[in-house]
Image (cartoon, helix red, strand yellow):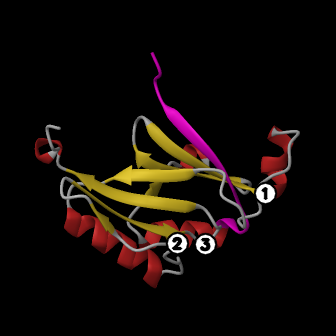
Amino acid sequence: MVQAIYINLPVANLNKTREFWSKLGFSFNEQFSDDKALCLELSPPSIYAMLITKDYFETFTDRPVADGKTTQVLLSIQVESRKRVDELVAMAVHTGANRYRDATDHGWMYYDSFVDVDGHQWEVMFADEAQIPLE
């Protein structure tokens, strides 16, 4: 059984990255943060993103590291309401992120998207499973 998930992402500037996510209301696990990495708490105690300086990130792989100009992964986080989707994306854009597509509404699922200050693509979504069509 998996006890926790750590998503590892390269970042350009730890201070700028910390400021961005802090302004969105997220916290960091300081026990796993230092001058090379930040441990972003997405859903403690089980889901975290390790935001690692690019130079240090490169020591963990023998493959080229994405530079923010290509998409290798889409990160999705589920929140409690449509309103919270809109609030979080608006805060992200206000804090330096960019939207890369318009919000999408499937009735039972609603999501919007942004690219963070390090070029990572995030989708913020709300889903009401009781509203899923029975087709």
Q: Residue at x 48, y 69 (%)?
A: 114
First to last magenta residue range? 1-14
Q: Residue tagged by mark 2?
A: 20
Label 1 amino acid? Answer: Lys
CA gap, disc 3 and disc 2: 7 Å
Q: Residue tagged by mark 3?
A: 117
Label 2 amino acid? Answer: Phe
Crowding at dot 1, Cα within 10 Å, few <14 / some 14-19 / many 20+, comes out as some
Q: Is residue 61 left or right of residue 30?
A: right
Q: Residue tagged by mark 1?
A: 54
Q: Is residue 93 left or right of residue 8?
A: left
- Relative depth, front residue between 88 and 48: 88
Residue 125 location (% of width, % of height): 32, 57
Label located before the other in sequence (1 or 3): 1
- Kindly indicate whether the residue at mark 2 contacts the one at mark 3 (C-beta within 8 angstroms): yes
Which residue lies most toward the bottom here?
A: 94
Q: Which quadrant is the N terminus positioned in? A: top left
